[in-house]
Image: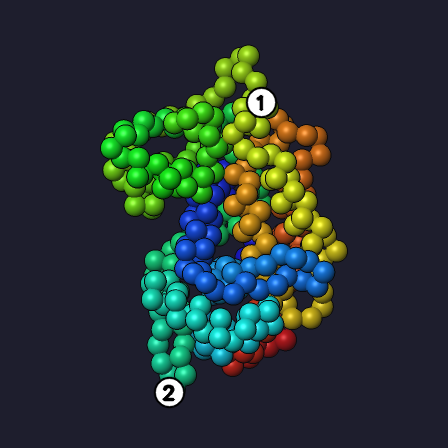
């Protein structure tokens, strides 16, 4: 399921990766966080694990609604208590992210159409062979002026722009690598009215502009590097031989965090050993190695026996 997409598709996928994580976080409430692999302090919200599961193993396959027991067993192996797992399924159903049906006395779940569309769009970047690349020299510049009477919107606008990969150059002026569909970003965040207060343009730096300087001013470059390095350290040696379904779910949750942190900063303006390409290669190697076993394991869970 690892596909190659062009840079324009990756820009759209970047926005949807962030929307997917935002939905996962918003649905979390007081949900328990699950532990990572042994020796790691990383923790996950159960919703992020479920989105990773759907995106990594279910997306693109013609599968029936999945019994609650399958989710409970999977989340248990990832460190989530049964009560927290059941609460997560109920919460995501109330929020319209999951649809619940009953088969006899057992509850079965599938993604809602809206959530499935979001997962599909996020997959553009998750599965991209070059998720941190954009057409060279292309940026999106946005400026907005918020009247004093609408200061209630300020935090929501900043949060939406950050999710979409923008960094703040100065008050009211934001920039993102590549081409961002700003109208869609604002609409997805319920901020259509802000479009009347903002202007956005495709932009490219002119001669004399210190691109390295404005990148470091707009984004926490050192923290983004730390996120890449942590992912590489956790997965460099590859996954273990046991439980590919749980491992691919954990891998996807880790990868979504990297994609959320790095909007695709152009490596040529960063250090020569910038780790984005390496982390992408590690993800593809681990995902491709885990996928066949994870699909077989899920098929067995669902009673779908495949030859071989």
Q: Secondary structure at mark 1?
A: helix
Q: Residues within 10 Å of mark 2 (few under 14, many from 20)?
A: few
Query: Percent x, y for residue 118?
Result: 40, 54
| Residue at the extreme top | 208
In the picture, residue 78 is in which quadrant?
bottom right
| Residue at the extreme bottom | 104
Q: Which mark is residue 104?
A: 2
Query: Percent x, y for residue 235?
Result: 69, 54
Query: Looking at the image, is 71 positioned above or below residue 279?
Result: below
Query: Looking at the image, is 198 positioned above or below residue 231?
Result: above
Taking the spot 54% from the left edge, 46% from the top edge, the residue there is 259
Query: Percent x, y for residue 229?
Result: 68, 45
- The residue that label 1 is drawn on is 213
Taking the spot 25% from the left edge, 37% from the top edge, the residue there is 193
Taking the spot 65% from the left edge, 50% from the top edge, the residue there is 231
Query: Percent x, y for residue 20?
Result: 44, 53
Q: Quadrant of the C terminus?
A: bottom right
Q: Could you tell which of marks 2 and 1 lies nearer the N-terminus?
A: 2
Q: Residues within 10 Å of mark 1 (few under 14, many from 20)?
A: few
Q: Which mark is residue 276?
A: none
The answer to whether residue 74 is seen in the rendering is: no
Q: Quadrant of the N terminus?
A: bottom right
Q: Secondary structure at mark 2?
A: loop
Viewer-proximal residue among 295 and 168: 168
- Residue 235 as seen in the image, left or right of residue 182: right
Front label number (2 vs 1): 1
């Amino acid at each position: 399921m690892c596909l190659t997409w062009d840079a324009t598709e990756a820009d759209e996928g970047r926005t949807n990766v962030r929307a997917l994580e935002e939905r996962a976080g918003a649905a979390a409430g007081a949900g328990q966080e699950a532990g990572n692999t042994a020796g790691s302090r990383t923790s996950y919200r159960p919703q992020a694990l479920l989105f990773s599961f759907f995106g990594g193993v279910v997306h693109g396959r013609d599968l029936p609604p999945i019994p609650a027991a399958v989710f409970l067993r999977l989340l248990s192996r990832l460190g989530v208590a049964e009560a927290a797992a059941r609460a997560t399924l109920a919460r995501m159903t109330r929020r319209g992210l999951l649809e619940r049906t009953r088969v006899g006395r057992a509850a079965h779940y599938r993604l809602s159409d809206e959530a499935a569309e979001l997962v599909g769009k996020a997959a553009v970047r998750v599965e991209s062979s070059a998720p941190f690349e954009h057409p060279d020299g292309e940026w999106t510049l946005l400026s907005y002026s918020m009247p004093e009477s609408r200061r209630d919107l300020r935090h929501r606008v900043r949060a939406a722009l950050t999710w979409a990969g923008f960094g703040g150059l100065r008050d009211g002026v934001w920039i993102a690598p590549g081409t961002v569909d700003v109208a869609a970003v604002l609409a997805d965040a319920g901020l259509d009215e802000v479009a009347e207060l903002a202007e956005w343009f495709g932009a490219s730096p002119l001669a004399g502009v210190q691109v390295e300087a404005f990148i470091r001013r707009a984004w926490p470059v050192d923290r983004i590097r730390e996120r890449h390095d942590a992912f590489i350290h956790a997965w460099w040696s590859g996954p273990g031989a046991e439980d590919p379904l749980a491992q691919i779910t954990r891998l996807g949750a880790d990868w979504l965090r990297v994609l959320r942190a790095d909007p695709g900063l152009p490596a040529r303006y960063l250090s020569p050993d910038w780790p984005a390409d390496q982390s992408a290669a590690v993800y593809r190697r681990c995902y491709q190695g885990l996928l066949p076993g994870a699909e077989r394991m899920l098929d067995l869970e669902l009673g779908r026996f495949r030859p071989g």
